[in-house]
């Protein structure tokens, strides 16, 4: 079973970040201050499992329930067949997590023991060097997750109802989309989909912005990647490719962190013909390569012209200053 907490002795004279966390985690939940919770949530924000909670007060609810667990070298945190009790984040030390197929070592800042489809562990976590962990009971995680999903689904209903493609959907079909949708998070400069790919669904931007870029042929031997659009909250990625069953006309590149609501093709095919047709009508097309190339070259010429104008202006100003100085020097002393 999951190991019990071992005594911890503060031996450092200064309260470094790990020691600050140890100090907070040893406090009872009710005694943690707003500053304590701020430090804990800053740590939790980097954990992929907890990314969906970042923009909500549920992350603070989770932060209140983590506690300190210290396990000695060579001991197991849990073994194959144990009941899954907690989720863990490593503060110091390292843990080897071994399953039938993989072996990985989790160090400071990493996590393991995430909830899965089974309540029984399918791997063994063994401590390689004395480890200090942030531990969260999975029952607490599931409870907070359910509350979060309930609130989030309400927000998603409002969001989807505001999307032009779904404004005519009856409530039951809108509910089906919300229930079947997937939330996907992308880090900065990550491709959501690539030019030429076939798509399996549509991504609607919930947070952040996406750059639509296309690789076009400039000459027979040279191509160039140009920006063709800036997509914001509410915009779709892959809608035209899905409804026309054609490859993507562009690549979609995240600009900073981006959260998307992903609707699979199978989910959308449940729409009736009228609503599917409306989805087709609202899909956004882009000009062909020839038109984009002409626009790109026009913008290049304008940029070169502006650069030339600026240089001419600078040279003219320098010439006037030079002539003024020459006239000043020629005055009788």
Image (tube, rainbow, N blue to C red):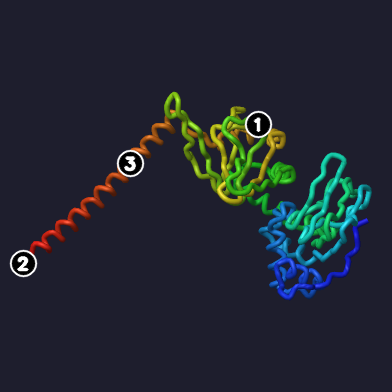
| First in sequence: mark 1 vs mark 2 | 1
Q: Which residue is mark 1?
A: 273
- The residue under the point 87% across, 47% down is 123
Tell me if 87 is positioned left or right of 185 in this view.
Answer: right
Cα–Cα gap, marks 2 and 3? 45 Å
Q: Which mark lies nearer to you, 2 or 3?
A: 2
Residue 280 visible in image: yes
User: Where residue 208 appears, x then y in whole percent?
Assistant: 58, 51
The answer to whether 252 is drawn above or below residue 29 in the figure is above
Tell me if 263 is positioned left or right of 128 in this view.
Answer: left
Q: Residue furthest left?
A: 332
Cα–Cα gap, marks 1 and 2? 92 Å
In-front residue for pair 243/125: 125
Check disc 3 and report its element: helix, strand or loop.
helix
- The residue under the point 54% across, 35% down is 250
Q: Which residue is mark 3?
A: 304
Mark 1 neighbour density, 10 Å: few (under 14) some (14–19) many (20 or more): few
User: Where residue 42 appears, x then y in whole percent?
Assistant: 68, 63
In-front residue for pair 209/112: 112
In-front residue for pair 111/306: 111
User: Where residue 50 appears, x then y in whole percent?
Assistant: 73, 55
| First in sequence: mark 2 vs mark 3 | 3
Q: Point out which mark residue 332 bears.
A: 2
Tell me if 8 is positioned left or right of 221 in this view.
Answer: right
Mark 2 neighbour density, 10 Å: few (under 14) some (14–19) many (20 or more): few
| First in sequence: mark 1 vs mark 3 | 1
The number of callouts visible is: 3
């Amino acid at each position: 079973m999951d190991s019990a907490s071992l005594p911890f002795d503060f031996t450092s004279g200064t309260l470094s970040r790990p020691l600050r966390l140890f100090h907070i985690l040893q406090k009872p939940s009710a005694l943690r201050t707003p500053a304590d919770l701020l430090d804990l949530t800053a740590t939790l924000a980097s954990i992929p499992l907890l990314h969906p909670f970042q923009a909500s007060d549920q992350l603070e609810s989770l932060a209140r329930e983590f506690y300190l667990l210290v396990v000695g070298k060579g001991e197991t945190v849990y073994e194959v067949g144990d009941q899954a009790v907690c989720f863990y984040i490593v503060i110091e030390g390292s843990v080897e997590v071994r399953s039938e197929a993989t072996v990985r070592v989790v160090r400071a800042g990493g996590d393991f023991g995430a909830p899965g489809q089974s309540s029984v562990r399918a791997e063994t976590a063994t401590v390689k060097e004395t480890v200090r962990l942030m531990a969260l009971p999975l029952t607490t995680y599931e409870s907070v997750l359910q509350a979060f999903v309930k609130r989030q689904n309400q927000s998603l209903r409002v969001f989807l109802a505001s999307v032009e493609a779904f404004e005519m959907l009856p409530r039951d079909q809108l509910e089906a989309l919300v229930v079947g949708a997937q939330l996907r998070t992308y880090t900065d400069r990550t491709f959501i989909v690539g030019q030429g790919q076939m798509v399996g669904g549509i991504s609607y931007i919930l947070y952040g912005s996406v750059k639509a870029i296309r690789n076009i042929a400039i000459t027979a031997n040279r191509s160039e990647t140009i920006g063709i659009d800036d997509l914001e909250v509410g915009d779709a990625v892959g809608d035209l490719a899905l409804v026309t069953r054609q490859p993507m006309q562009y690549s979609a590149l995240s600009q900073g962190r981006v959260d998307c609501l992903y609707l699979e093709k199978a989910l959308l095919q449940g729409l009736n013909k009228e609503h599917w047709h409306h989805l087709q009508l609202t899909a956004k097309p882009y000009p062909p390569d020839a038109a984009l190339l002409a626009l790109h070259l026009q913008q290049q010429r304008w940029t070169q012209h502006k650069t030339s104008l600026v240089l001419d202006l600078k040279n003219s100003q320098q010439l006037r200053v030079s002539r003024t100085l020459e006239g000043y020097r020629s005055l009788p002393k």
